[in-house]
Every structure is written in C-alpha cells, then in structure tokens.
Image: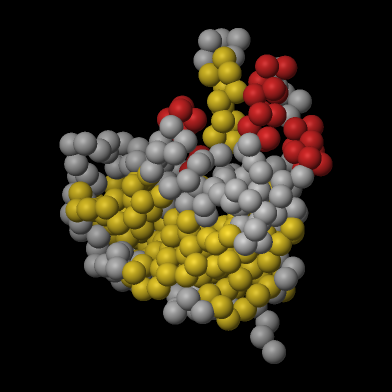
Amino acid sequence: MERTVTIGEALDDQETGLTRVGDVVVLEGRLFVAQPRERCLRIFSLAGEFLGVVGREGEGPGEFGYVNGLGVRDGLLWASDSFLGRVQYFDPGGQYVSSLRIRGHPTLPIIGLEVLAVLADGSMLARDPPGASQQAAFPDRPEHVIRLDERGSLRDTASVLVGSPSVVALGETSRGGISYTMLPESYRSQFSPSPDGTGFVVLHREAARRAEPHTFRVIRFDAGADTVWARDIQYDPIPVTSAWRSQHLKERDDLNAPMLRELRRAYRRLEFFPPVRQAKAGADGTTWLRIRTGVDAWEWEVLDRSGRSIARVGMSPQGWLKWAGTDTLWFLDHDEFDVPYLVKYTIRRP
C-alpha cells in the first residue's frame, strides 16, 4: 500500500480542514465525507481537491439536524439524519433528490435511531444505540440491529451484537453526575455494512479466558440478511501487559484518585487483547480485518467474496479504515493535537 493523498491536516483551512469525521463514501470519482458537527458533507476529488459542501444545519430539503451514515443505492448517495429521523438522497454532484421519513415502531424512538445501511431492496438497517449509563450498568445486554422496510417501518431483527462494551463508570463528579470513560479495547461485536447495500459483515470477538488457541467469528450476510459465509478463525490470545496498562493510566492525569482507582480495576479485568481491532466491509465484496499480532502490532487480512483469505498486509496504517475499494483505501487518522485527517492508500499489485 502506497500513501498517495492526504486531506484535512490544516484545520484552519475553510475548505479542506475537517472536524469530526463520520462515514466516507466514494461515488463516481468523488469522495463524500460526513461532517456531523457542521451538519454537512464535504466533497473532494480522489486527488484531494476540494469540490464543495452539501447541506447545512436546518430541517429543509438537503439540510441536516445531524449527519452520520452514508452509502450508495441505485447510483445515488444517501445520508442518514438521526436527529430528524430521515434519510436523504443526493445525486453524484451533491444535488438533493428526495427524502424518506423513518416511521419505526411504537417501541422505538424516532429521534436517535441510527440508520446504518440502505440495502439493495430499499430496506434499511438501524439501531437504537444505548447511552453510556446503559452500557456501564448492563455491559452484557445484547444490542439489536433492526431492519426497516422501504417505507421506514419496523420489519424484523437482522443481527444481534454481543460482548462487553468499553464504557466504564468512574464515579460521581463534583456536580453530582456520573463520569464515564471508554477503554481502548472492547470485546463488543462489530457491524460493518457494504457501502452499496449488497450486504453487511458482523464480527463476533468473544473474550479469551486462557492463554491457549481461541477463535473469533466473522459472518457475511447478503441484502436479504441471509448468511453468505461464516468463518471461525483461530488465533493465539495476546496477554495484556502491566507496561501497557501503566502507559495508558499515565495518560489519565485528568482523573481524581477515586476515579483513577476505578479505572485501574477496569484495566485489570482486561486479561487478553481482543483479536481484531476493526472489521470493514469493502465496496468490492471483500472484508478487511485488522488483526492484532502483538501488544502494539497489527496486520490487515483480506477475505474475498467467499470468505477466503487472499492477502495479508504486514505494515498496516494506524488509523481507522473508512473506505475499502478494489485499488484504494481511505483511512481516518489524527495528529498530535487530535486534528482529524484522511489518508488515501493506493494498492500496488505485482
């Protein structure tokens, strides 16, 4: 993989500077980047040239109360708005086309329901994300990914995410509220939809309890939520070291003594690292797995449409994979001041 383009390193640049980055989608030679804080999408060429902005804060056509999920269906870009409870469609040039209100179900909230994918048949996958207090109080409670029909009404459950999340309650603050934090590692299942709505990938990573061969499971579903393939992949659990714990605790000088003690207890409960940091469904039917090979070392394993391993990349970028195509990858990374930027990698084949 060759690093070829960088976008967003200059935060003070009104055109290319990025704030918090949501989903990223490539459509007809353009890169669309969700900007949740600014309630808009930024458009770039694949060479990194700024092309314009789609949307602004508001409730009218083409406006957003919040923007998070992005994807492609029938040659159009869709963008989900969990605040206004709708999905909007735009053409490849960024022009507004139409919108769909989420009806949901009496048992589900409309505001806050996150649309994760629009599938090829027009149905949608969504979730009602639990808050920090719920995750901390009920860490083993399953989370349901529900399927909505093409009109936005509840249809059924497409998948269930399990495992302990990374949220920890540290204790009461001076103002009477509860302080929460997130551990850098989690055994929670991951969900990754294909950008074009042809299916989705679920990664289950059950916690290892002993230093002996263990497995994690990857499942690929099609647009009808039927299983395409499932793989149980064996790995050797990597123990969490005291040096790793100490290093991460040193970075939390913002906590008082009781909160730091609670955080230490949470870190001690981490016996082994999760085997996979990220699972990403590619736009070409591939599945990318960022597999841990050491305390601070990873490799990317690439699975084809049938779940067969076809490549292994030893020197992986450190950021979060946002888009995987046949020949290009887009990663989200942050500099030393936590400023986000996107990096394009071109895949070179012999």
Q: Nearer the viewer, residue 80 or 248?
A: 248
How many marks the image carries: the answer is 0
Residue depicted at x 74% and y 68%? 315
Q: Nearer the viewer, residue 100 or 13?
A: 100
The location of residue 167, given as percent across then percent down, is 54, 34
Residue depicted at x 55% and y 25%? 169
Q: Is 350 situated above or below 213?
A: below
Q: Residue furthest bottom?
A: 350
The colour scheme used here is secondary structure
Residue depicted at x 42% and y 70%? 230
Q: Quadrant of the N terminus?
A: bottom right
- Residue 46 visible? The answer is no
Q: Nearer the viewer, residue 265 or 39?
A: 265
Q: Nearer the viewer, residue 154 or 213?
A: 213
Q: Locate residue 248 relative to residue 233 in the image: left or right.
A: right
The location of residue 79, given as percent across then percent down, is 38, 54
Q: Quadrant of the C terminus?
A: bottom right
Q: Is 64 situated above or below 155?
A: above
- Residue 138 visible? The answer is yes
Q: Locate residue 18 relative to residue 245 in the image: left or right.
A: left
Q: Quadrant of residue 181?
A: top right
Residue depicted at x 60% and y 23%? 170
Q: Is 61 situated above or below 192?
A: above
The location of residue 92, given as percent across then percent down, is 40, 67
Q: Is 61 situated above or below 134?
A: below
Q: Locate residue 203 relative to residue 261 in the image: left or right.
A: left
The location of residue 327, given as percent across then percent down, is 58, 78
